[in-house]
Structure formats: structure tokens, C-alpha cells
Image: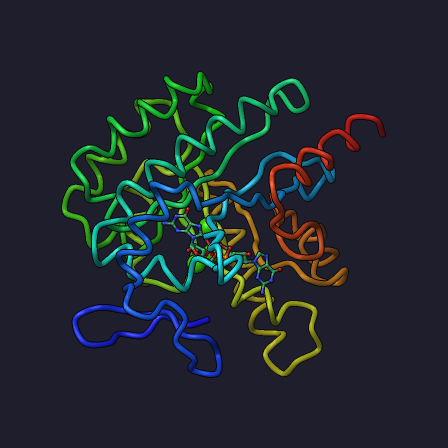
């Protein structure tokens, strides 16, 4: 499904162009979605490359629409961002993710919960209060919460450094998502209090692929891992889809991996079953 700009608002169309939400704009539908509790989180496992241990999950938002089914974030987050709806939606995500992490504590006491922040949320004056509220209402220990921010958010926000310090003061982890795709000024890496980098999956795709671009992608991924290591940052490589990619990353001392090979995003029930299975083995 696609969201298309239309007149003053948006409407949701199917691939064939058939209008589904008639007069109701996507914005109105999004507003109701929050009230009607139609949002759900799926969770994708993150593994320590060296040991093969599951160390965390990334919470990924979906909209369980009554007629359209499971709508991916790319179809509604851009509009939620423009309208500011991402602020209440993002607060819900934070709280839900923290509560889920607490619910899994007996199965996985140290499991980290990674949550994506949008630019709008990062700029919001209430961000620190919202994160504090999510931690307090859920009872999650702060070191188990990881926030994923993008390079462009860090570059564009005047208050970025101050906000990062206040987040670090709460005790949460902060990582740079989609590393390598945004602003290429690396100076922030020495200045900002961040814990890690997530190498974007566009770089992972070529690794150990045999494609013409393979050598370059491999060189880039290795270089970023070296750079991060030298700066004391941990590296997650996302979009790991094949066994040769995983072998390559292990050989080159990658910290964490995430991708379809080692686990797709899945609902809380399925991820819970995966955690239970791991405990038995
Ligand atoms: P992202 O943060 O880069 O999340 C990773 C995306 O890559 C996810 O797509 C995930 O399903 C997908 N992915 C994971 N492993 C693989 C793989 O091996 N191969 C490929 N091709 N893809 C893989 P998803 O869930 O559709 O999310 C898309 C984007 O939407 C996210 O990109 C993130 O930027 C945004 N998003 C998701 N949830 C939230 C949220 O709660 N808040 C905010 N602000 N943004 C979110
Ligand atoms: Ca992410
Ligand atoms: Ca990413
Ligand atoms: Ca992304």
C-alpha cells in the first residue's frame, strides 16, 4: 500500500490504485489508530557475533489496520512526522517497548530493547520527560534501553549535544542508526556521547556477495568497524541476509549482527517463544 499526497491530505491506496479509505484521510485514520490501539510492535533479534548470544531486540512499529492489514512504518511514519503525530505515537512505542522488555526479564534478564527515535521526537522539548516516564512506569532499568538516532538528526538539531548528554545522564544507551547514509562529517563521533554505530544495510548487501561492488562494501564495512573500535564504539551490522556475510563479519570482529538470516522482526509472542527456546538449549 502507498500513502499519496492528495489535495490537503493523504489517502491510502492499494498497489492498483484503488482507494481504500475513501473520505477518511490517512491523518484522521492515524489519529484514530492511536485511540483504537491499532499499533503493534514487532521485535527483531540482535546477536553478539562472537558468541551467537541474543543480546537485544529492536522494536519496529506496525499499524494493524482493520481492513488493510499490517501496514509497514514506511507507509505512515513520514506523515506522522509531518503532522507531529509521531510524538504521541513515539511515546506509546517507548512505553510499550519498555513494558515488553520488563515482561521478558525472567527469560532474559539483560536483554536490551532498542527503540527508534524520529527527528521530531528528538527535537521535542519533552523528550527527556517522555523517556523518564517510560522507564519509570515500566520499571525497566535504563541500561537496558537503547535509543537509535540517525546522523542527520544529530547534525541538524542545534541542541543535539545537550540532549544527548541528558539522555546519557538517564543511563540509557544511544546508537547512531543508518550509519554511513547521512551527513558525512565524522567530527561528531569524537564530540558526542554515543555508545555505538549501526552500519546501514545498504553496505551489508554487497558484503561477500560476489557482486562487482562486493570489494568496496567489504572495505567500507571493515573500515567503519576499525574506526568504531578505535573510538571505543560498538558496531551493529544490520541487514545480514546470508551465511557468507555472517562469516565475514565474524572474521572481522564485528560486535553485533541483525538481519533476516538471524531472525526477522516478529510479534511479541513469537519472540517470547524464541527466548524460551534459547533458555532450554
Ligand atoms: P530501520 O531503523 O533501519 O529498521 C530496520 C529495517 O530493516 C526494518 O524495516 C527491518 O524489518 C528491516 N530489516 C531487518 N533485517 C533486514 C534484512 O536482513 N534485510 C532487509 N532487506 N531488511 C531488513 P521496517 O520494520 O519496515 O522499518 C523501516 C523503518 O521505519 C526503520 O528503519 C525505522 O527508520 C522506521 N521505524 C520503524 N519503527 C519505528 C518507530 O517505532 N519509530 C520511528 N520513529 N521509526 C520507526
Ligand atoms: Ca533502527
Ligand atoms: Ca537502519
Ligand atoms: Ca532506516
Number of callouts in the render? 0
Residue 156 location (% of width, % of height)? 20, 54
Residue 227 visible: no
Name which residue lies at 47% across and 33% down: 97
Residue 139 location (% of width, % of height)? 44, 16
Q: Is residue 128 above or below residue 44?
A: above
Residue 71 location (% of width, % of height)? 48, 59
26, 181: nearer the viewer: 26
Name which residue lies at 27% across and 52% down: 153
Compared across the picture, whether 29 is left or right of 232 comes to left
Residue 125 location (% of width, % of height)? 16, 36
The residue furthest right is 281
Name which residue lies at 32% across and 56% down: 29
Compared across the picture, whether 76 is left or right of 101 comes to left
45, 217: nearer the viewer: 45
Q: Is residue 217 above or below residue 86?
A: below
The residue furthest front is 23
Where the C terminus falls, by quadrant? top right
Q: Is residue 118 above or below residue 195?
A: below
Name which residue lies at 41% across and 45% down: 116
* Colour pattern of the rendering: rainbow
Residue 78 visible: yes
Amino acid at each position: 500500500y502507498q500513502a499519496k499526497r492528495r489535495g490537503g491530505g493523504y489517502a491510502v491506496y492499494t498497489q492498483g490504485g484503488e482507494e481504500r479509505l475513501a473520505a477518511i484521510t490517512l491523518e484522521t485514520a492515524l489519529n484514530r489508530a492511536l485511540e483504537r490501539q491499532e499499533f503493534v510492535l514487532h521485535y527483531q533479534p540482535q546477536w553478539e557475533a562472537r558468541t551467537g548470544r541474543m543480546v537485544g531486540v529492536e522494536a519496529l512499529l506496525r499499524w494493524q489496520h482493520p481492513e488493510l492489514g499490517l501496514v509497514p512504518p514506511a507507509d505512515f511514519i513520514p506523515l506522522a512526522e509531518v503532522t507531529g503525530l509521531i510524538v504521541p505515537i513515539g511515546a506509546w512505542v517507548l512505553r510499550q517497548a519498555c513494558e515488553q522488555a520488563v515482561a521478558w526479564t525472567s527469560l532474559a534478564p539483560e536483554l536490551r530493547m532498542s527503540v527508534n527515535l524520529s527527528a521530531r521526537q528528538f527535537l521535542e522539548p519533552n523528550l527527556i520527560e517522555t523517556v523518564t516516564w517510560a522507564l519509570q512506569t515500566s520499571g525497566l532499568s535504563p541500561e537496558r534501553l537503547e535509543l537509535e538516532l540517525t546522523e542527520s538528526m544529530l547534525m541538524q538539531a542545534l541542541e543535539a549535544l545537550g540532549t544527548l548528554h541528558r539522555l546519557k545522564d538517564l543511563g540509557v544507551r544511544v546508537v547512531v542508526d543508518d550509519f554511513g547514509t547521512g551527513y558525512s562529517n565524522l567530527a561528531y563521533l569524537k564530540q558526542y556521547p554515543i555508545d555505538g554505530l549501526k552500519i546501514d544495510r545498504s553496505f551489508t548487501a554487497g558484503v561477500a556477495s560476489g557482486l562487482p561492488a562486493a570489494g568496496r562494501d567489504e572495505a567500507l564495512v571493515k573500515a567503519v568497524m576499525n574506526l568504531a573500535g578505535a573510538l571505543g564504539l560498538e558496531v551493529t551490522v544490520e541487514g545480514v541476509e546470508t551465511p557468507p556475510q555472517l562469516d565475514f563479519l565474524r572474521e572481522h570482529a564485528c560486535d553485533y549482527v541483525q538481519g533476516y538470516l538471524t531472525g526477522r522482526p516478529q510479534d511479541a509472542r513469537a519472540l517470547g517463544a524464541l527466548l524460551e527456546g534459547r533458555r532450554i538449549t
